[in-house]
Image (tube, coloured by chain):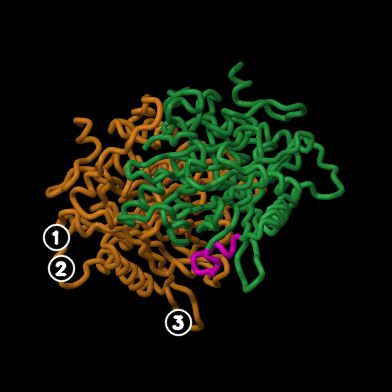
Chain colours: A orange, B green
Amino acid sequence: MKPGPRNLITDVAGLRVGNASDPDLKSGTTVLTADAPFVASVSVQGGAPGTRETDLLAPDKSAPGVDALVLSGGSAFGLGAAEGVMAALRAAGRGFAVFSARVPIVPAAILFDLLNGGAKDWDESPYPALGRAAFDVAGTEFQIGTAGAGTGAQTARFKGGLGSASVVLDSGATVGALVAVNPMGCAVTPSGKHFWAAPFEMDGEFGGLGPDPVPGFRPLPPSRKVEAMARQGNTTIGIVATDAALDKAQAQRLAVAAHDGLARALVPSHSPHDGDLVFAAATGARRLEDPASELLQLGHAGAVAMSRAIARALWEATPSDGDTLPTFRQSLGQ
Amino acid sequence: MKPGPRNLITDVAGLRVGNASDPDLKSGTTVLTADAPFVASVSVQGGAPGTRETDLLAPDKSAPGVDALVLSGGSAFGLGAAEGVMAALRAAGRGFAVFSARVPIVPAAILFDLLNGGAKDWDESPYPALGRAAFDVAGTEFQIGTAGAGTGAQTARFKGGLGSASVVLDSGATVGALVAVNPMGCAVTPSGKHFWAAPFEMDGEFGGLGPDPVPGFRPLPPSRKVEAMARQGNTTIGIVATDAALDKAQAQRLAVAAHDGLARALVPSHSPHDGDLVFAAATGARRLEDPASELLQLGHAGAVAMSRAIARALWEATPSDGDTLPTFRQSLGQ
């Protein structure tokens, strides 16, 4: 296992990611798409999800593929970002064909960033336009940190953000993760100097700070986020993607496994106040030679990539005017 | 947060646990029960579960409580352990009342230990008798390590076992975990000298070995278990219990949160070849003053207790004749 050339989810060939954000709003949207529909499923494990078009991702539901996946800030208003993405897909003649009609399939998930210091006094929802803008700039290179759906994200003690990472397996398959990190919990151990994800770091991609050497259990420090706003309103939303040819049921198992990456990188996670959710996407370019063994490896890689993507989100976050929380690197004096 | 007086799930007042095992069979059964029915739910996250009476644990299903929970070796044969427990409950006049009839409600989950070197050539299933024997000895003290459902359990590199741990929260609520550890993955980091669960250890309860100091990602060593038997046939099955008054939906969220304890203590976990499952049980003695906040704390405590219980299972495992894998302490030269 090693990172792909970009260390981004777009190391999975054919995938493109676009971000759009509004610094005054302190929010934004991230869109993952491809030139052709791709297989997708989802695992919703948090207690407070906000979603759209997730029911059709169950393995027993008929939709064979999706045209894009949306991660957005804006709480339930952010689900409107899918409108903009659907409009762009419609203009391009894309979508599920029902005779001459085309219906773009765009599952979406949101995080809560309505109390993060941004200007939330809009009259018309900004999210459809953010969704369309993110779709329009989608490419193989994109910014992580304070970008897209992670623009206004926060963790318990530090600014959150958008993260991504990738893994190339010995088999040649690629697995990538993309995540907007806005949990109740913290990505950093109680000392405030080490990432929980440290045992999975590759090539110093989030500072090479190593594991926290302090032995044994320590209580979690008070949440600055809870002090600054309400306890409600968190969520880590992500996508794990691969070039392997998975069916929807296999994609769902990949999504379940990737939740382990959340659990290891964020403490606590999957709380009643988190809407933690992972989409899985499979482009289908690589046929599985040994499905039983390879799905296990893909799941492990997905969890590892997800943990790393979460730590990278915080590591790459940058300060903005009006922030209510510092970035992790600010706290280290960097 | 601190461990309860026994550091066992029976620190939750009213709960009793019993083990039964057969050393030649290299298998056994563990039963958790109480003097009165208790609220229970479940979260099944592995790809290869083996279960009985789990559907009635969904929050929308009517059954208000259960009489016992069973963890057993024996793969699907081990589900028969519930027969023995039901017989004992029936003899005691226990069970869900339908007019004059009493139906004991005994959800059960199993792990695969059919290829662990034990004598599996029985003609009549030994599990109903193991279930009844475990029920009959249930008390507040019970053995962990090579005991009960963990008797024949194995991890990727070391002997598995039965583990338990408890937490007393600042609120006074108690949370306990009980787990039979038989995963595809490993509880020990690639160096073979440190538990993944180290950041959650209390009072040197699993050797005080501390976190693995090696920075960054390392590939998982080959699985001795896969070399010794098939890839299929794993599973970590556990129970998280509390004295808090949870309804079934809240208990289900506790079970989901406790899966994070599996993810942190076992790498990989929740694979297609694991039937990873956590029951949640709530005795109801303590009313929640602030449900939104307390359920979060209970879930975090449940995850912490589950990670610790997993490491304790390996730490307390003892060698037996005919073992195909060493214990972790044997590998340390202890």
Judge the density around disc 3: few (<14), some (14-19), many (≥20) Cα neighbours within 10 Å: few
Q: Is any atom of residue B46 visible in this view?
A: yes
Marks 2/3: CA–CA distance: 34 Å
Rounded to the nearest whole Å, what is the CA distance between mark 1 and mark 3?
39 Å
Q: Do residues under tags 2 and 3 come within 8 Å of each other at their CB atoms?
A: no
Q: State which tag comes first along the sequence, 1 or 3.
A: 3
Q: Residue at x 60, y 53 (%)?
A: B68
Q: Amino acid at mark 2?
A: Trp
Q: Report the disc number at residue B134.
A: none
Do the numbered discs 1 and 2 sit on residues whose CB atoms are within 8 Å? yes
Of B284 and A223, which appears nearest the observer?
B284
Q: What amino acid type should be assigned to the residue bearing mark 3? A: Ala
| For residue B152, above or below residue B276 | above
Q: Residues within 10 Å of mark 2 (few under 14, many from 20)?
A: few
Q: Main secondary structure of the magenta part?
A: loop
Q: Is residue A50 magenta?
A: no
